[in-house]
């Protein structure tokens, strides 16, 4: 497969997943503010912590009010990770793939792109935040269904899978870290009404509330939330599930490579001949999977959840960089 095609597939998937994730975050935060009284004077500010955009936002806006945060995260063309920017970039990558993707998928992505050009705060006010994001969520679900049901399971599909799962794993670690580390710093409030509502909202952000209740019941327990979102191999938005699917897809990709055996799963004796820098890049995915399969929430929380999540984010970044160097870099 040409590196350019692999790059387009990988980034089309990442941008679509990022746009869907941010749409879900904004929608859930809006409902949370309706269900519970805001804490502090900037109830929309936590979203900026979750997405990692706080510094960029503060450099361009003086107030973290609803209109400013909504515009920045949803509409701002100068914010490279706004929902509109992600849709535009996903469409540009898909446009380069029109001969490789189904007509149904192109039509759905292109229609979303055309509609996104007319998005505005006035439209949000007319349709309502709930109506706007409810429709947007359904459109992302349709795209996911079209991908699943119209594309052949070839190497191209594997690059789509890798892009989706890498973005999803990174996002769930940021979501969990922001709730645990940023949103409720005062210990005396732990377990209170607002705290429980925030944890429930976080589960909804990951489409995990019903799955959590099915497994653990209605009682919100932090360690069980961490177990579900990080280490449950059966939940499709957990970091463990994402890492498993990435590994499976990468195995198929490297198996299809011509020439020498891929470095990613070489034996110890073979890998000893490589430089330490090369080994570090190629062994990350395998180590990530082993880590997530063998860890438990209680142990991680006791040792330090924030540091663990930072390590996972660093590993996701390293995986993306290594994939780019080996499969997607082109002149």
Image: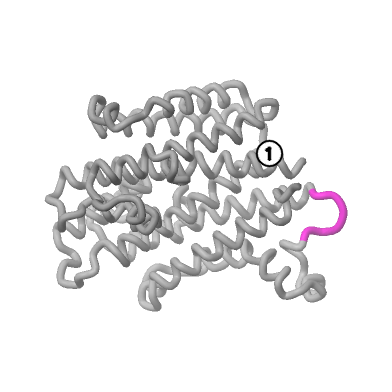
Residue located farthest toward the bottom when viewing the structure as drawn: 303
The residue where tag 1 is placed is 156
Residue 323 relative to residue 58: left or right: right
Instruction: Return the x and y of residue 268 as percentages of the image width and height.
Output: 76, 73
Magenta stretch encompasses residue 46: no
Residue 154 is left or right of residue 73, and the answer is right
- Please tell me which residue is depicted at 65% across the width and 48% down the height of the picture: 249
Q: Which residues are magenta?
A: 257-262
Q: Nearer the viewer, residue 289 or 17?
A: 17
Residue found at x 37% / y 37%: 75
User: Compared to 186, does 131 lie above or below?
Assistant: above
**Image color mode:** one colour
* Residue at the extreme right of the image, as rendered: 259
Task: Tell me where residue 78 sits by quadrant.
Answer: top left
Q: Which quadrant is home to the N terminus? A: top right
Q: Position of residue 9 (x, y in %)?
A: 63, 39
Residue 214 visible in the snapshot: no
**Left or right: 53 as drawn, with respect to 104:** left
- Place residue 173 in its image quadrant: bottom left
- Tell me which secondary structure the magenta stretch mostly adopts: loop
Task: Evaluate whether residue 107 shows in this view.
Answer: yes
SS at circle 1? helix
Q: Is residue 33 above or below residue 184?
A: above
| Residue 189 lies in quadrant | bottom left
Q: What crowding class fits label 1: few (fewer than 14 Cα within 10 Å), some (14-19), or many (20 or more)?
A: many
Residue 35, position in %: x, y?
15, 45
Q: Position of residue 179 (x, y in %)?
A: 30, 60
User: In the image as oriented, which residue stretches furthest toward the left?
Assistant: 37
Instruction: Give yes or no for residue 261 being in the magenta stretch.
Output: yes
Task: In the rendered view, tell whether residue 127 sits above or below residue 306.
Answer: above
Residue found 50% across the figure and 65% down from its top:
312
């Amino acid at each position: 497969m040409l590196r350019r095609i692999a790059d387009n597939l990988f980034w089309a998937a990442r941008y679509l997943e990022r746009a869907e994730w941010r749409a879900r975050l904004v929608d859930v935060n809006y409902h949370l503010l309706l269900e519970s009284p805001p804490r502090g004077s900037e109830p929309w500010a936590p979203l900026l912590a979750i997405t990692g955009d706080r510094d960029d936002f503060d450099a361009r806006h003086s107030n973290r009010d609803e209109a400013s945060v909504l515009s920045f995260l949803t509409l701002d063309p100068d914010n490279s990770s706004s929902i509109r920017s992600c849709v535009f970039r996903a469409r540009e990558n898909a446009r380069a793939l029109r001969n490789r993707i189904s007509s149904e998928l192109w039509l759905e992505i292109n229609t979303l792109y055309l509609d996104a050009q007319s998005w505005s705060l006035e439209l949000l006010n007319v349709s309502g935040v709930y109506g706007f994001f409810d429709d947007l969520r359904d459109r992302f679900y349709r795209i996911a269904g079209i991908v699943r049901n119209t594309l052949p399971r070839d190497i191209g599909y594997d690059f789509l899978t890798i892009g989706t799962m890498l973005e999803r794993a990174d996002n769930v670690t940021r979501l969990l870290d922001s709730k645990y580390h940023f949103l409720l710093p005062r210990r005396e409030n732990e377990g209170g009404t607002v705290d429980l509502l925030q944890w429930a909202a976080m589960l909804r952000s990951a489409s995990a509330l019903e799955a959590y209740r099915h497994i653990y019941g209605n009682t919100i327990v932090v360690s069980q939330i961490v177990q579900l979102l990080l280490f449950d191999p059966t939940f499709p938005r957990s970091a463990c599930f994402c890492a498993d699917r990435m590994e499976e897809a990468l195995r198929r990709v490297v198996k299809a490579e011509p020439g020498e055996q891929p470095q990613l799963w070489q034996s110890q004796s073979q890998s000893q001949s490589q430089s330490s820098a090369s080994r570090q890049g190629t062994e990350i995915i395998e180590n990530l999977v082993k880590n997530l399969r063998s860890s438990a929430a209680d142990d991680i929380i006791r040792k330090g959840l924030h540091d663990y999540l930072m390590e996972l984010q660093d590993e996701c970044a390293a995986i993306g960089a290594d994939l780019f160097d080996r499969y997607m870099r082109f002149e």
